[in-house]
Image (cartoon, rainbow, N blue to C red):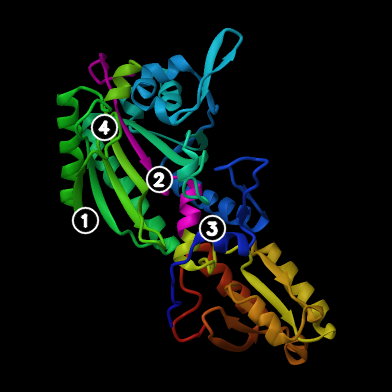
Amino acid sequence: MREETTMHDHRKLGRELGLFDTDPLIGAGLPYWLPDGATVRHTLEEYIRTAERRAGYRHVYSPVLGKRELYEISGHWSHYSDDMFPPMDLGGEQVVLRPSLCPHHAVIYRSRAHSYRELPLRMAELGGMYRSELSGVLGGLTRVRAIQLNDAHIFCTLDQVADEARAALELIRRAYEALGIVPARYRLSLPGPGGKYVAAPEMWRRSTALLTDVLDHSGLPYEAAEGEAAFYGPKIDVQVVDSAGRESTLSTVQVDFHQPEQFDLHYIGADGAKHRPVMVHRSIIGSVERAVAHLIEQHGGAFPAWLAPTQLVILPISDAELPNAEGFARRCADLGLRAEIAGPERGSLGARIREARLVPYQVVIGAKEAADDHVAVRLRDGRRLDSRPAAEVLTRIGALVGTHRTDLWDADGRM
């Protein structure tokens, strides 16, 4: 039996479930995360970091501030300054809150000499950035001023670009499968008229041809859209739709010839000469804020078990079973499972079950279960499993959570 998914307004549900909130004293577009929301965010970030490490990425940290000159070199100042916060004067220098991580990663790449043998060099970061959004467009987690971005930049040869872009799309596909996200469509985002794009026709032709070829060979249906490219290059955008039917970009893959030129990046080729790398930008889930907003709406707060803030609620029928419940909770903690006890002081068993309706696993312990070291399991989707050994239940749930499955149990409820 599949769990039903219904779209909800994440702003309302996120506050009702105690995931995040805002306060005018902190400021508009600057939400704070409550413990359950912080657990979801941390778990999602760790999933991404692990997936990136397995795919050969190396993680870095870089500052959220940079000199204005950095963004003049990258092109952000001339093409993107309307979305940046004003500069701050510090010791005779102007510094700004960064609107993007790519200039920092270009500088990190430039700080060391590189051989062609090192490429592709995959650099990743879950880092903060800031956008000067107008007050009228701010809302919940989808439009914020302080953003935690799942970002990465691959420095590679021209011959490696297509493979790296395809690999990025595969990382996105796997993440969506684990998160239960269904993309609305794939979009090839191209430049449009006007002066907001870098004026380099040949660069645009080459990068667009590369991404078009990747999409054509991927078998993914896509649509081209003018006016949606980054100022430095075209993008493959993965689009999702929110509860109000509004479409937005969640994940992206971009090809950039511009910034390697601007920062004079190079590697030493097999011929001993300097060569210019290509920069592939990619984000598996985009901003953590927007990703969590979409997950709240997609699942109505009933997150996949591996992502749920509380994965198991333990329900002793009476006070006599409390010691068994506490022992079971300790065994959960030892396995890295997030469990809490909802004892008889919180009401009848039926009331506690209703209160825990979004928790993936409801573990009931009565007198018979306590005597036999068994538990009876109720699944969030309404299925009830026969009483069975506690160790078997923990092994099964641990395996499902550890492999980032979206189903709660075997279809027939068997071990």
Percent x, y of residue 373: 73, 83
Label 2: element kind: loop
Instruction: Determine which residue is flagged by label 2.
Output: 55
Q: Earlier in the sequence, mark 1 or mark 2?
A: 2
Q: Tell me the distance, in whole angstroms, between the alpha carbons under discs 1 and 2.
A: 22 Å
In this picture, is 239 found above or below 181?
above
Q: Which mark is residue 233?
A: 4
Classed neighbour count for the residue bearing mark 1: other residues with Cα under 10 Å, few (<14), some (14–19), many (≥20): few
Which residue lies most toward the bottom here?
368
Q: Does residue 210 show up?
A: yes
Classed neighbour count for the residue bearing mark 4: other residues with Cα under 10 Å, few (<14), some (14–19), many (≥20): many
Mark in the foreground, 1 or 4: 4
Mark in the foreground, 4 or 2: 4
In this picture, is 159 found above or below 53?
above
The part of the chain drawn in magenta is 265-294
Instruction: Determine which residue is flagged by label 1.
Output: 220
Percent x, y of residue 232: 29, 28
Q: Name which residue type carries label 3.
A: Arg
Q: Is residue 137 left or right of residue 356?
A: left
